Image (tube, rainbow, N blue to C red):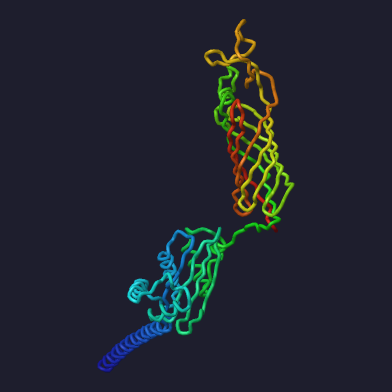
């Protein structure tokens, strides 16, 4: 009985060992089969990929040169993993050896000839150029054997050249039917810009702000201490106001305008100097340039007095008896209110960004007592179509 049980136990152990070895062998075979399938599938996929070379990416109006842009395109094309892309160093070597001019590879015949010398079945070419406020990217793929373009595409982007790499990626993906991130595409492509026609009217009603500088005797009187009748102001003063305009002529890109501008000056010095200006203006919509001229009215305090031998300003009422100084009228906060007039000559340019207009103007008001120079800018938002 003992020997029987022992023999049965030995047989069971032997069977377990055989089963374990069988399972181990089976697992090894399965792993080998899977590895071989992956290998042959990889070889098959590689063999099915068409060979392609990137040559002839022309550039116009951008800071990056042709070589840099071509390298960007090469990189983005390799990322797609859809083609067997000829290495750029190999391309450069063959191009140099065969006497191929990459900058001249734009026509079908040139691309076909270069493709045969490079030993590829497809040629990737195109252009990247800036036109006004847009960057236009055009790509195409030529079948070397047939001499026909099998793929072509054009995309327009905002003029944001620092994002050129992303623009090229979007263009390559679009050409090959690969989905792009719509949010990134919208940020680089969509541009809400007003359409301009010969009948387009540009209205620059809106706030204005800037600064003025008064020279000559007027400037000195404004900077003089209050004890001497001055305003104790800075030589450069602030200006805040609002401009309203009416158009009375519109012919093509030319506009004739009547402009009204109300301003307050000198607030930073504790002064309150209101002014009203009426100007006749001429604007050229295409370039955004403008010229205007007209009268300006402001209320100031003036008094009669004289400059003594030392050049000090003194009121007429304080003139010594028998003195014979020239009596003149000057700005003096101790005097009486008076309407002062002057002529304003202004030149400006409107900077446009979509529906946003930013008018920038420089102006001068010449006077014998002191010339005023000024700079103003503002903004207004044109109504966009709904």
Q: Which quadrant is home to the N terminus?
A: bottom left
Q: Nearer the viewer, residue 326 or 3?
A: 326
Q: Going by the picture, which residue comes out furthest to the top?
A: 321
Residue drawn at point x = 43 percent, y = 75 percent:
81
Report the side of 1 relative to 347 (left or right): left
Q: Position of residue 165 (x, y in %)?
A: 46, 63
Q: Which quadrant is home to the C terminus?
A: bottom right
Residue drawn at point x = 63 percent, y = 45 percent:
290
Q: Nearer the viewer, residue 179 or 116?
A: 116
Residue drawn at point x = 46 percent, y = 74 percent:
124
Q: Position of residue 193 (x, y in %)?
A: 62, 57
99 lies above or below 295: below
Report the side of 235 relative to 59 (left or right): right
Q: Quadrant of residue 373?
A: top right
Q: Position of residue 35 (x, y in %)?
A: 36, 83
Q: Quadrant of residue 91?
A: bottom left
Q: Position of residue 271 (x, y in %)?
A: 62, 27
Q: Going by the picture, which residue comes out furthest to the right?
A: 248
Q: Nearer the viewer, residue 72 or 183?
A: 72
Report the side of 2 relative to 339 (left or right): left
277 lies above or below 138: above
Q: Quadrant of residue 377?
A: top right
160 lies above or below 381: below
287 lies above or below 331: below
How many numbered discs?
0
Q: Going by the picture, which residue comes out furthest to the left?
A: 3
């Amino acid at each position: 009985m003992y020997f029987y049980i022992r023999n049965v136990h030995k047989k069971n152990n032997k069977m377990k060992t055989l089963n374990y070895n069988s399972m181990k062998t089976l697992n090894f075979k399965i792993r080998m089969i899977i590895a071989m399938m992956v290998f042959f599938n990889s070889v098959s996929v590689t063999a099915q990929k068409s060979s392609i070379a990137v040559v002839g990416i022309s550039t116009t109006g951008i800071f990056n040169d042709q070589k840099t842009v071509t390298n960007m395109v090469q990189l983005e094309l390799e990322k797609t993993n859809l083609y067997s892309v000829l290495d750029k160093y190999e391309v450069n070597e063959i191009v140099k050896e065969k006497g191929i001019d990459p900058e001249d590879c734009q026509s079908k015949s040139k691309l076909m000839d270069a493709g045969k010398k490079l030993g590829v079945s497809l040629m990737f070419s195109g252009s990247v150029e800036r036109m006004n406020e847009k960057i236009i990217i055009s790509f195409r793929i030529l079948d070397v054997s047939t001499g026909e373009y099998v793929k072509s595409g054009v995309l327009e982007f905002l003029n944001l050249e620092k994002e050129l790499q992303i623009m090229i990626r979007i263009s390559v993906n679009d050409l090959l039917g690969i989905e792009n991130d719509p949010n990134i595409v919208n940020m680089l492509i969509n541009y809400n810009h007003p359409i301009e026609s010969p009948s387009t009217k540009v209205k620059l009603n809106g706030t204005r702000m800037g600064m003025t500088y008064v020279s000559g005797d007027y400037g000195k009187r404004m900077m003089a201490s209050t004890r001497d009748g001055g305003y104790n102001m800075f030589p450069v003063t602030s200006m805040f106001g609002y401009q309203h305009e009416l158009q009375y002529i519109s012919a093509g890109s030319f506009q004739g305008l009547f402009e009204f501008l109300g301003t307050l000056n000198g607030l930073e010095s504790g002064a309150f100097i209101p002014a009203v200006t009426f100007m006749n203006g001429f604007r050229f919509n295409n370039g955004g340039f403008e010229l205007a001229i007209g009268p300006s009215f402001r209320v100031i305090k003036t008094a009669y007095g004289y400059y003594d031998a030392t050049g000090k300003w003194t009121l007429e009422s304080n003139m010594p008896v028998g003195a014979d100084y020239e009596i003149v009228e000057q700005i003096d906060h101790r005097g009486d209110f008076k309407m002062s007039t002057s002529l304003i000559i202004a030149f400006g340019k409107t900077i446009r960004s979509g529906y946003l207009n930013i008018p920038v103007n420089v102006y001068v008001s010449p006077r014998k007592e002191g010339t005023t120079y000024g700079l103003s800018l503002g903004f207004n938002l044109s109504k966009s179509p709904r």
